[in-house]
Image (spheres, rainbow, N blue to C red):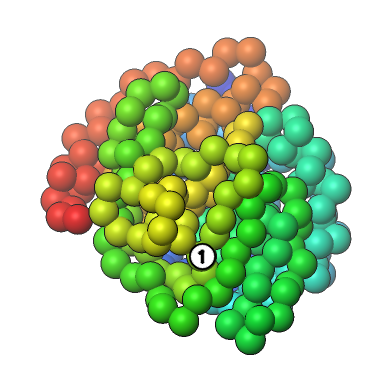
């Protein structure tokens, strides 16, 4: 008998899986199953009519401009559902191109302004210079300061309004290469430029997200400890 049953929604996995970002959902599912928590993953793509009403977690990976524009009309039809998810503290993890689409707009390199979901107070402006390379940021996970590392590859420069960054850039470009911020943390929405994929070598961050998913419908959100030796070995082998 599973301790809990969770429903994860993976948005547009066929379009938005830049740099193997789908590995993030694999980590979340595995770390849940290792704790006897049953997880179903619903893949939702363009044209699907399935609702998020029962979602305990929403995930959207990264993708280049072409894929972003291909999914955006369908994603916009989901705006109210996603607004409810954010308001109800359903955890959302959005990576790079997926992260950009939750903001107010994306101004393309041709100076065309593409309206995005507008659910969070930030916006993105394409720049001629691609921001690529390993990145390290300092952020708080459950109140504990941690150095989070990954790989970034984007031309979009994201600027924050009334939202907090996920962390401060220690090495790399971050949101825009100027203000030293990286990502966004709002309620249980986590947006970040960190590919990698991010979660395989950040077990604390993965468990933080998993606890938020549990909290949507369950009072008990404690997770049994796991042996994270391999995860930390992978983390320590990455030179930023
Ligand atoms: N097309 C976006 C940009 O280049 C996002 C790229 C990505 O998801 N890696 O900024």
One can see residue 198 in this view = yes
The percent position of residue 100, horizontal first and vertical second, equals: 60, 61
Q: Is residue 10 visible?
A: no
The secondary element bearing badge 1 is classed as strand
Q: Residue at x 67, y 34 (%)?
A: 90
Q: Residue at x 43, y 37 (%)?
A: 206
Percent position of residue 140, x then y: 40, 30
130 lies left or right of 103: left
Viewer-proximal residue, 30 or 94? 94
User: How many numbered marks, from 0 up?
Assistant: 1
Question: Quadrant of residue 172 in the image?
Answer: bottom left
From the viewer's side, name the closer residue of 26 and 166. Answer: 166
Query: Which quarter shows the C terminus?
Result: bottom left
Q: Judge from the rendering whether residue 188 lies leftward or rightward of residue 80; answer left or right.
A: left
Q: Label 1, on which residue?
A: 157
Judge whether 72 appears above or below 187 on screen.
below
Residue at (67% x, 55% y) in the render: 103
| Quadrant in which the N terminus is drawn | top right
Find residue 138 and report its image quarter. Answer: top left
Whole-percent x, y for residue 114 in the image: 73, 72
Residue 91 at x, y = what percent? Answer: 61, 37
Q: Is residue 142 above or below residue 133?
A: above
Q: In this view, which residue lies farthest toward the top?
A: 219
Question: In the image, is residue 93 above or below residue 34?
Answer: below
The residue carrying pointer 1 sits among few (fewer than 14), some (14 to 19) or many (20 or more) residues within 10 Å by Cα, namely: many
């Amino acid at each position: 008998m599973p301790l809990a049953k969770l429903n994860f929604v993976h948005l547009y996995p066929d379009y938005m899986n830049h740099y193997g970002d789908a590995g993030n959902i694999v980590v979340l599912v595995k770390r849940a199953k290792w704790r006897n928590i049953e997880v179903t993953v619903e893949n939702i793509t363009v044209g699907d009519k399935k609702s998020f009403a029962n979602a305990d977690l929403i995930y959207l990976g990264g993708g280049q401009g072409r894929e972003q524009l291909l999914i955006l009309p369908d994603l916009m039809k989901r705006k109210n559902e996603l607004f409810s998810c954010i308001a109800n503290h359903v955890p959302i993890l959005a990576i790079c191109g997926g992260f950009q689409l939750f903001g107010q707009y994306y101004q393309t390199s041709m100076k065309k302004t593409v309206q995005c979901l507008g659910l969070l107070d930030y916006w993105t402006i394409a720049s001629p210079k691609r921001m690529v390379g390993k990145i390290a940021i300092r952020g708080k996970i459950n109140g504990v300061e941690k150095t989070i590392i990954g790989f970034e590859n984007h031309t979009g420069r994201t600027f924050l309004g009334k939202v907090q960054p996920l962390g401060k850039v220690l090495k790399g470009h971050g949101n825009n290469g100027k203000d030293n911020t990286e990502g966004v943390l709002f309620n249980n929405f986590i947006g970040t430029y960190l590919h990698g994929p991010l979660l395989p070598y950040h077990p604390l961050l993965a468990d933080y997200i998993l606890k938020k998913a549990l909290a949507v419908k369950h009072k008990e959100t404690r997770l049994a400890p796991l042996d994270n030796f391999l995860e930390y070995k992978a983390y320590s082998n990455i030179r930023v």
